[in-house]
Image (cartoon, rainbow, N blue to C red):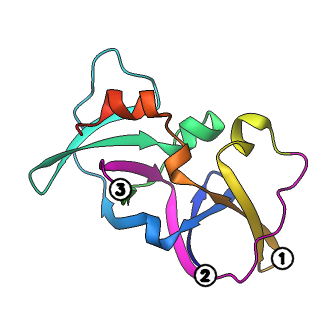
């Protein structure tokens, strides 16, 4: 399986490459009044509105400082702001998650792998927003 790796704070995460439609640079975001703190707003992407989630804030409570947005491939377009996009890795088998991870992060993860003696956490982007949250920020 192929994974794209990216940084959030001092951790490296990965997601299945096939779950990413594209990577775009952050542009002007229009805030959505009354939305969750981690929903940065929407930006225009080729004539469509793309809701942008601060992935660092959603997972770790600390805002992402980067300018790259992973656009999830699915029925509804959603972008996830990350600190930096790193590499594409071929991984044969995922390892279990480290035991010390808090449950509020663990529920979004599917496994881990080693990259240069560092643990990379595999994040399922489709789990980051619940169906209810997704329906509130996207247009079907």
Q: Is residue 10 visible?
A: no
Q: Label 3 belongs to which residue? A: 74
Residue furthest to the left in view is: 47
Pick the quarter of the image with the C terminus: top left
Q: Position of residue 28 (x, y in %)?
A: 21, 43
Farthest residue in the top direction? 34
Q: Nearer the viewer, mark 3 or mark 1?
A: 3
Task: Measure how far apart labels 3 and 2 are at the Cα level.
Answer: 22 Å
- Give the quarter of the figure containing the N terminus: bottom right
Residue that mark 1 sits on: 117
Q: Is residue 37 above or below residue 112?
A: above
SS at mark 3 in the image: loop
Q: Name the residue at 49% across, 37% down.
A: 129
Q: Provide the residue designation for mark 2.
A: 89
Task: Write the residue at 27% across / 24% down.
Answer: 32
Q: CA distance from mark 3 to mark 1?
A: 33 Å
| Mark 3 in CB contact with mark 2 (< 8 angstroms) | no
Q: In the image, what residue occupies the spot 45% across and 25% down?
A: 37
For the record, the magenta segment spans 75-100
């Amino acid at each position: 399986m192929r994974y794209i790796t990216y940084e959030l704070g001092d951790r490296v995460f990965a997601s299945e490459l096939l779950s990413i439609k594209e990577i775009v640079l952050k542009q002007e975001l229009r805030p959505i009044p009354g939305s969750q703190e981690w929903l940065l707003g929407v930006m225009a992407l080729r004539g469509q509105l793309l809701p942008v989630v601060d992935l660092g804030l959603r997972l770790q409570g600390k805002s992402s400082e980067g300018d790259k947005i992973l656009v999830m491939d699915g029925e509804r377009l959603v972008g996830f702001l990350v600190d930096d996009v790193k590499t594409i890795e071929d991984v044969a088998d995922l390892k279990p998650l480290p035991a010390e991870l808090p449950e509020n992060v663990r529920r979004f993860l599917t496994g881990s792998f080693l990259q240069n003696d560092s643990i990379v956490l595999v994040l399922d982007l489709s789990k980051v927003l619940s169906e209810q949250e997704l329906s509130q920020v996207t247009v079907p």
